[in-house]
Amino acid sequence: MCRQVLRDDQWERLKNLLPGKASDCGVTAKDNRLFVEAVQWIARTGAQWRDLPTSFGHWHRVYVRYNRWSHKGVWTRIFDAVSDDPELKYLMVDGSIVRVHQHGASKKTERDEQAQGKSGGGLSTKIHAAVDALGNPVRLMLTAGQASEYGQADNLIKDIEAGFVLADKGYDSDGFVASICAGGATPVIPSRKNRSTPRDYDKEVYKARKLVERFFQKLKHYRRQQAPDIRTGGPTPRIFP
């Protein structure tokens, strides 16, 4: 369990971003640090909430609190705050599919809200990510699994000032290239085979794109992201179900 415990320096960075402080209006949280560590344990192990060790508190109270923070946008605010100083020499975008466990399948009328859709292997969700030159996430989005990656490309880079935007040939479209240039960045995207006039791109700079692939590999260590067994949280990430 020690791998899921926050270091003191990590906690110092997070603690003032969380609700329930003594200086806040309303009820003062009993132990925000223990609660965040409980959420981290669930994310890392992929376990169901009922399997949360009792040392973190009663699983249902932890779940209710997590869900409340999700609906209030607390996790999104935390993510924005800890990623407020990215290294934007390069911005790399990519996407990855996560299969939806049968216990997490939504009703047909709720699939759009829950970012679930049918692809070749059944119900799935697609994670879209933009990472900086250090491989750290700058922006995350969720869509149904069958959604194209380049369909969210403009949203991933919107209002982010980068030097170069790197992506694989799946993102090669005139519209996306124009959006990159309009934002003052240089596109580094290989041309599709069917492009009549292939564009030149910097092959040395393109080698840095491995960082976004490594980011998705790191996500796989957090089993809750890779094998969700209950519903996901819609177009804005809730961290996990």
Image (cartoon, grey):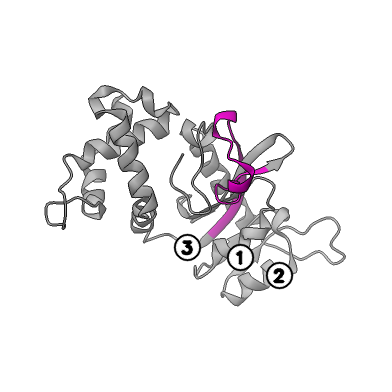
Indicate the amino acid at tag 3: Leu
Mark 2 or mark 1: whose residue is earlier in sequence: 1
The residue depicted at 18 percent of the width and 44 percent of the height is 29
Tell whether 28 sits left or right of 186: left
The label on residue 175 is: 2
Cα separation, mark 2 vs mark 1, equals 9 Å
- Marks 2 & 1, CB-CB < 8 Å contact: yes
User: Which residues are the magenta region?
Assistant: 91-117
Viewer-side residue, 222 vs 115: 115
Q: Give the residue pinned by disc 3.
A: 88
Cα separation, mark 1 vs mark 3, equals 16 Å
Residue 49 position (above or below residue 145) = above
The residue depicted at 55 percent of the width and 29 percent of the height is 103
Q: Give the residue pinned by disc 1.
A: 154
Estimate how packed mark 2 is, as few (under 14), some (14 to 19) or many (20 or more) residues with alpha carbons within 10 Å. few
What percent of the width, then of the height, locates residue 217?
54, 37
Mark 3 or mark 2: whose residue is earlier in sequence: 3
Tell whether 101 sits left or right of 191: left
Indicate the amino acid at tag 2: Gly
Residue 106 is covered by the magenta coloring: yes
What percent of the width, then of the height, locates residue 58?
26, 28
Quadrant that contains the N terminus:
top left
Indicate the amino acid at tag 1: Asp
For label 3, the SS is loop
Quarter-wise, where is residue 182 in the image? Answer: bottom right
Mark 1 or mark 3: whose residue is earlier in sequence: 3
Estimate how packed mark 1 is, as few (under 14), some (14 to 19) or many (20 or more) residues with alpha carbons within 10 Å. some
The label on residue 87 is: none
What percent of the width, then of the height, locates residue 33?
22, 40
Viewer-side residue, 10 vs 134: 10
For label 2, the SS is helix
